[in-house]
Amino acid sequence: MTTTSLRFRAAIVSVALFLAFIGIWHLATRGTASVAIMSPEYAKLMGATATQGKSAMPGPSDVGAKLWEHLKRPFYDNGPNDKGLGIQLGYSIARVGLGYLLAVMVAIPLGFLIGMSPLISKALDPFIQVLKPISPLAWMPLALYTIKDSGISAIFVIFICSVWPMLLNTAFGVAGVRKEWINVARTLEVGTLRRAFTVILPAAAPTILTGMRISIGIAWLVIVAAEMLVGGTGIGYFVWNEWNNLSITNVIIAILLIGVVGMLLDQVLARFTRMVAFPE
């Protein structure tokens, strides 16, 4: 079976599974109507009266219609609690991008140092083993207390969660470079810095990019939870705000978009990884 044939058959199966899911979803929600309810807690916060009633799960047609409304006006801004999905996603992607870039600037050079120096590796290992298992969100209260800015605190949390996969993969990739190549470079009197860029980096690049790919997935996952905590803007805040409004349709749309954006971010790095590992 050729690669093209396999991809075509996989696409057919994917479409069939998607249509089956939509059909089951439609049948499960048929005959129900989605009723927007304001929870008592949110009503008290907003100074309004809670609407009582029974909420029903929206069907695919409800979600599709609402999604089309959002796509027609993705960048509207009607105030702090009413912004388009394009704006909310933009805030989240910007925070992830800044935190991720800072993590790249720290993790990859430090990973090179750890991988190239057994002494530094042994010295830093206790600190890494203690800090690595800490949930990124556990840093949020400390970040809010010291930084006193919710947006920058969210970026700091993204930085923390992105550092470890890149750092460990970089150190592993650098330490795993074949000693014969390094010995040849030393024999040719290639300096340490030049050896790192011309010998070690190309050999370790696939492993480093794998760590970067893992990090971007974790960063996108964490930003949603972080924005739920800090509020204000972002797709995570949008989800929490729509839940407070009991707009389950908007919650489903946000979940869908979170998944799509996460997939696109992963595929960009996957493409770079394939280009490095299997250059044409």
Image (tube, helix red, strand yellow):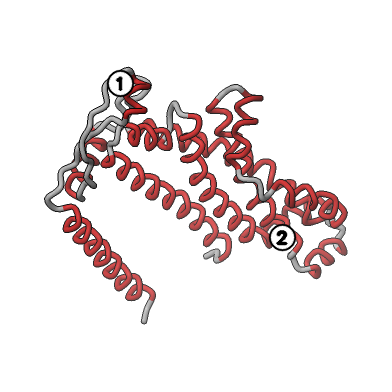
Q: Which mark is residue 262?
A: none
Could you say which is closer to the camera, residue 163 or residue 25?
25
Could you say which is closer to the camera, residue 187 or residue 45?
45
Residue identifier under label 2:
172
Relative vertical location of residue 163 with respect to residue 89 in this rendering, above or below: below
Q: Residues within 10 Å of mark 2 (few under 14, many from 20)?
A: some
Which amino acid type corresponds to the residue marked 1 in the rendered image? Asn
Residue 157 in the image: state x and y as whole percent: 59, 37
Q: Earlier in the sequence, mark 2 or mark 1?
A: 1
Q: Residue furthest left?
A: 31
Could you say which is closer to the camera, residue 276 or residue 269?
269
Which amino acid type corresponds to the residue marked 2 in the rendered image? Phe
Residue 131 in the image: state x and y as whole percent: 71, 46
Residue 33 in the image: state x and y as whole percent: 15, 43
In space, the residues marked 2 and 1 are separated at their CA atoms by 49 Å
Could you say which is closer to the camera, residue 226 or residue 268?
226
Residue 196 in the image: state x and y as whole percent: 76, 54
> To which quarter of the image does residue 67 belong?
top left
Residue identifier under label 1:
78
Q: Residues within 10 Å of mark 1 (few under 14, many from 20)?
A: few
Residue shown at 35% from the left, 22% from the top = 44
